[in-house]
Image (tube, rainbow, N blue to C red):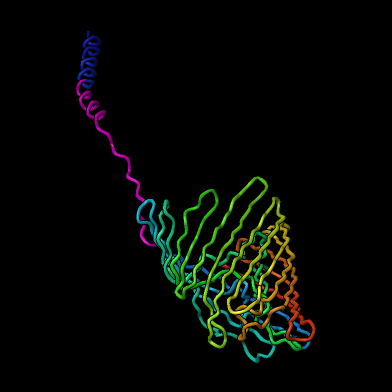
Amino acid sequence: MKLRHCIAGCASAVAIAAVSAAPDQALAADITVPAPVATCERPIELTVSGQVNRAVLYADNGDDNDVFFVDNDNSSTRVRWRATGDIDCVNTVGALIETQFESNSTAAISFEQNSAAGPNNFTERHMTVWWENDNLGRIWLGQGDMASNGISEIDLSGTSVVAYSGVADLASGLEFSGTSTQDVGDAFSNFDGLSRQDRIRYDTPTFAGFRLSASVEDDEGWDVALRYAGEFGFGEIAAGVAYFSAQGVNGAGASRDFDGVSGSGSILFNPGLSLTVAAGYVDPDYSGADPYFLYGKIGYETQLNSLGTTAFSIDGYYGEDITNVGGVTAAGNGIGDESLSFGAAIVQNIDIVRTELYLAGRYYELDDVSAVGEDEIYAVISGARVRF
């Protein structure tokens, strides 16, 4: 009898509990908990980065030879402050300040110097703000790259820290001997667009690997550039071409207007072979010269050790009338000059510390029509770039 009463009581309790719980369960079923709202807003964040690139350079022009402890102007010592923030999911704003500090730069050294060359202080590279919309592209305002800057320097070889189409950078300030009055920087150029200026610039979004850019600078110069980058089963391709129009001033203060076209392309095949080419032509309005250059490079990148990849390259450069663009004071000087250079380089990456160790040799030859015979410079450089 007690057992029957217990069973009946327990059944009643369970029924009461079920009835009591039913309203709460029904209420819970009607309540929808909202998912967290995703936000793309992000306040401005600052990133500091940079690099130090120091080297030992030996050079010989037949009359003089010397050893220099230099800053490698192929990729100078510099520091940058980059700030970016997101307004919403499609709009981003940013700012960039980048300065370089080169002590005894390869662009300024001379066989005649008695102390370190160059200004040995901070000089501006970038001081610009930008706004980007994912659908409309990016607008830049301030000191920075014109659309054409870098257009003849596209290079996938892995050795551009010490060898690329700007062959002059390794020893730009050094003078040829004998009867020539030119230095390496006068006789070799890759006509790399309009460099960095105070400008306004627009970049389209990237469509199928292509991006179009245009800019106008403060001194009536303008340019337009088209770039492409893509990956394929066999490797990578990067290329670009630009047209630029600018106004320059010669040593006498006279106007030196010119137009130009430059471009470059590089293919990196798996597992590491690369081919790079570059070319450019400038039409200076102030003379009858037809300056142009051609550049070619073969590279190979492989994994020889656990530190990182090792890259090798050989390259060649040929130019005509280069000394008639920007480096001379009298219209017509340099017509018929021929510039020739060959180089070889090896770069060892140490990935864990973002460091590249490099060794390169380069030969420069100038056939100066105003001089007697050909002038030559031999240069060997070894150093390290540490990025942070």
Residue 50 coordinates in the image, percent (x, y): 53, 69
Q: Is residue 209 above or below residue 358?
A: above
> Quadrant location of the C terminus?
bottom right
**Which quarter of the picture shows residue 295?**
bottom right
Q: Is residue 374 above or below residue 26?
A: below
Q: Residue furthest top?
A: 1
Which residue is depicted at the point 38% across and 55% down? 91
Q: Residue furthest front?
A: 288
Number of disc labels: 0
**Which quarter of the picture shows residue 47?**
bottom left
Q: In this image, 143 relative to 176: left or right?
A: left
Which residue is depicted at the point 72% across and 60% down? 299
Residue 217 coordinates in the image, percent (x, y): 46, 71
Residue in the foreground of this view, choosing between 221 and 363: 221
> Quadrant location of the N terminus?
top left
Residue 339 coordinates in the image, percent (x, y): 72, 75
- What span is colored magenta in the figure? 19-45
Residue 279 part of the magenta segment: no
Which residue is depicted at the point 52% across and 73% down? 246
Q: In this image, 154 relative to 43: left or right?
A: right
**Which quarter of the picture shows residue 67?**
bottom right
Which residue is depicted at the point 25% across and 12% down? 7
Residue in the foreground of this view, choosing between 325 and 284: 284
Residue in the foreground of this view, choosing between 343 and 288: 288
Residue 181 coordinates in the image, percent (x, y): 69, 87
Q: Is residue 111 above or below residue 93?
A: below
Residue 25 part of the magenta segment: yes
